[in-house]
Image (cartoon, rainbow, N blue to C red):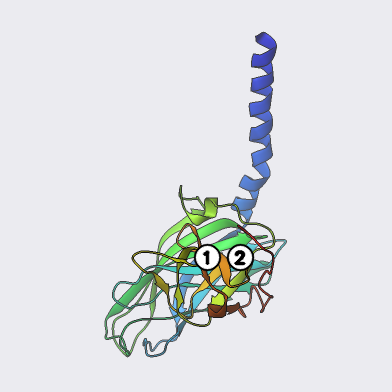
């Protein structure tokens, strides 16, 4: 019994030590969203592109950013947009993020929405910030208020806890996609993903008619014809996976 207890203590210590590099990485890889531009602002295009001012310290690998609308607040904006920045430190980077909207254009003033910006280190979420983007009238300016900033913490049950194979590739919806809970089996009630959104593609079904994707914290299926490569600054139009998955 004593030997088992000693072994258990040693195992816990080893596991704790194994976590130290990831903690150090989280402390070294940080960013803040300090503003948005230009000085005049409107939501008059679909999709609409927003440019954020970002200061960052991201050594060793490119800063991969994924921005997801988490509160549309009447703007109709949705989806996830990705980009990348060179490794190192940046004091005035201005990446652009594009989001489709279901609202009638132009969206009336004043408007505001909230995005969650996540920094990925070699594909692993590391640092995150929630930012509220708003505009009072046509004269602007955009305002970017950082609501939170710190190490990425996975939310239990969300897609970050799903096993994502190394072969998964970011794809973009080229058409509105009805969602299936299994190949050929539509969800009830029907859920449709609007064109312009992006998602991680895991693989395809036996018949080659559906892609399996990660969407809203779950695995679902969409018709292959509704998805194409994602040509953002992270995925660069990488071909979607052709492997058969269940």
Q: Which residue is mark 2?
A: 205
Question: Looking at the picture, how far across and down is residue 29, in whole percent?
Answer: 62, 58
Q: Residue furthest right?
A: 60
Q: Nearer the viewer, residue 30 or 6?
A: 6
The numbered dot on residue 183 is: 1
Can residue 206 be seen by looking at this rendering?
A: yes
Q: Is residue 12 left or right of residue 221?
A: right
Q: Are marks 2 and 1 in contact (CB under 8 Å)?
A: yes
Identity of the residue drawn at 68% across and 23% down: 10
Q: Nearer the viewer, residue 189 or 129?
A: 189
**How many marks overall?**
2
Can residue 95 be seen by looking at this rendering?
A: no
Q: Residue furthest top?
A: 1
Q: Which quarter of the figure is the N terminus placed in?
A: top right
Q: Which quarter of the figure is the C terminus placed in?
A: bottom right
Q: Secondary structure at mark 1?
A: loop
Mark 1: few, some, or many residues within 10 Å (few <14, many ≥20)?
many
Question: Looking at the picture, how far across and down is residue 228, in whole percent?
Answer: 60, 79
- Res 93 quadrant in image: bottom right
Identity of the residue drawn at 32% across and 75% down: 112
Q: If you read the primary sequence from the N terminus, does the residue marked by circle 2 or circle 1 appear first?
A: 1
Identity of the residue drawn at 45% across and 85% down: 47
Q: Nearer the viewer, residue 109 or 105?
A: 105
Identity of the residue drawn at 41% across and 67% down: 131
């Amino acid at each position: 019994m004593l030997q088992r207890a000693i072994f258990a203590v040693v195992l816990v210590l080893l596991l704790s030590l194994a976590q130290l590099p990831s903690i150090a990485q989280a402390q070294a890889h940080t960013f803040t969203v300090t503003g948005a531009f230009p000085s005049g602002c409107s939501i008059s295009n679909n999709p609409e592109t927003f440019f954020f001012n970002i200061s960052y310290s991201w050594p060793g690998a490119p800063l991969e950013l994924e921005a997801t609308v988490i509160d549309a607040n009447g703007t109709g904006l949705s989806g996830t947009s990705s980009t990348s920045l060179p490794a190192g430190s940046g004091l005035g980077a201005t990446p652009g993020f594009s989001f489709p909207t279901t609202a009638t254009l132009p969206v009336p003033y004043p408007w505001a929405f909230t995005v969650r910006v996540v920094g990925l280190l070699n594909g692993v979420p590391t640092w995150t910030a929630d930012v509220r983007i708003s505009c009072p009238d046509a004269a602007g300016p955009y305002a970017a208020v950082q609501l939170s900033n710190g190490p990425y913490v996975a939310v239990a049950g969300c897609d970050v806890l799903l096993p994502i194979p190394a072969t998964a590739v970011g794809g973009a919806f080229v058409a509105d996609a009805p969602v299936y809970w299994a190949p050929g089996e539509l969800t009830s009630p029907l859920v449709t993903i609007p064109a312009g959104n992006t998602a991680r593609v895991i693989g395809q079904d036996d018949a080659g008619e559906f892609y399996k994707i990660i969407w809203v914290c779950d695995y679902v299926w969409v018709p292959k014809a509704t998805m194409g490569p994602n040509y953002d600054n992270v995925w660069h139009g990488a071909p979607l996976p052709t492997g058969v998955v269940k």
